[in-house]
Image (cartoon, grey):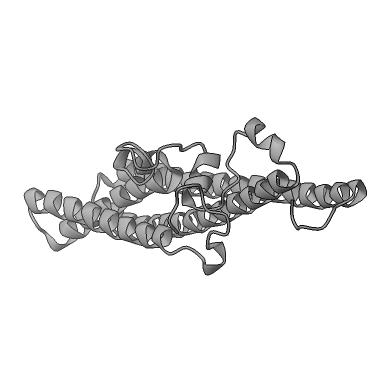
Amino acid sequence: MLNDSPVGHEDVAEQLQILTTEHWSLLATRSLTASEGLSRVTIFLAILSGAVIALALVAQADRFGPTFISIAIPLLLVVLFAGLATISRLNALNRDDYRWVVGMNRLRHAYIELHPELERHLTASPYDDLQGALRTLGIDDPMAGRGVGSVPHLLQTLPGMLTVIVAAVGGTIGALLAAVIGIPWQGAVAAAGGGFLLVLGSMAAWGRRAVTQPSPGLEPRFPSPGDDR
C-alpha cells in the first residue's frame, strides 16, 4: 500500500483515476514525440532528394564542370546542415521518449503498490532505472552483443541511419573541394573518405554524449531487484 493507514475503496479508486489519467497523458505525449521524429526524417529526406534531383539536372547541362561544382558545394552544405539539425532533434526526442517511459514505469509501480496481486499480469516493467526502461521498450538484454549500444543496434535507429547518410554528404563535399583545388582523383577519393569518417566520428561522439548524460530528474526511485544503485 502507499501508506500504513487504512485506505478506503473510494480513496483507492480516486488514486487509480489520477494515475490512469497521467498514464494516458504520457502515452499521448510519446505518440506526439514519435510523430515529430518521423516528420523530421521525412523533411530531411525530401531536402536530400530535391538536392540530388537538382544536381542531376545541372550535371546534364554542365557535364560536371565548374558550374556544377559551384552549385553542388553550397547546396550540399545546406543538406549537411539540415541533416545535422535533424539528428540533433532526433537525439533530443529520444531523450524525451526515455523520460516518458520512466514516468510510465513509475506509475506502473504505483499500480502495484495499490494492488500487488496485479504484478504477475504486467509485461512492461514497474521499475524506473535503465534496466526497467529498456524492458518496457522491448530490450530485455541490454548487455548482449547485439543489444542497445552495439553497432548493429545503432545503425538500425533513425539517428544512426541518418548519421551514415549525412556522413556520405560530408564525404561528397570533401571530394568536390578536392576537385576545386585540382587534386588528382586519388586525392579526391581520400578527401571523400576523410570527410565521411570525420562527420561519422563527430556525430557518433555527439550521440554518445547525449545518451550518457541523463537528466538529474531521472534518478531511479524504484530500481530493479538486484540493482545496486
For the point 75% across and 58% down, the residue is: 3
| Residue most extreme to the right | 10
Percent x, y for residue 31?
65, 45
Q: Quadrant of residue 151?
A: top left
Does residue 57 appear in the picture of this structure? no
Taking the image as shown, residue 111 lies to the left or right of residue 190, namely: right
Percent x, y for residue 44?
48, 49
Does residue 59 appear in the picture of this structure? yes
State the count of labels. Answer: 0
Taking the image as shown, residue 174 lies to the left or right of residue 5, namely: left
For the point 81% across and 47% down, the residue is: 16
Percent x, y for residue 224?
51, 48
For the point 35% across and 51% down, the residue is: 166
For the point 62% across and 45% down, the residue is: 35
Comparing 87 with 94, the one in front is: 94
Percent x, y for residue 217?
57, 66
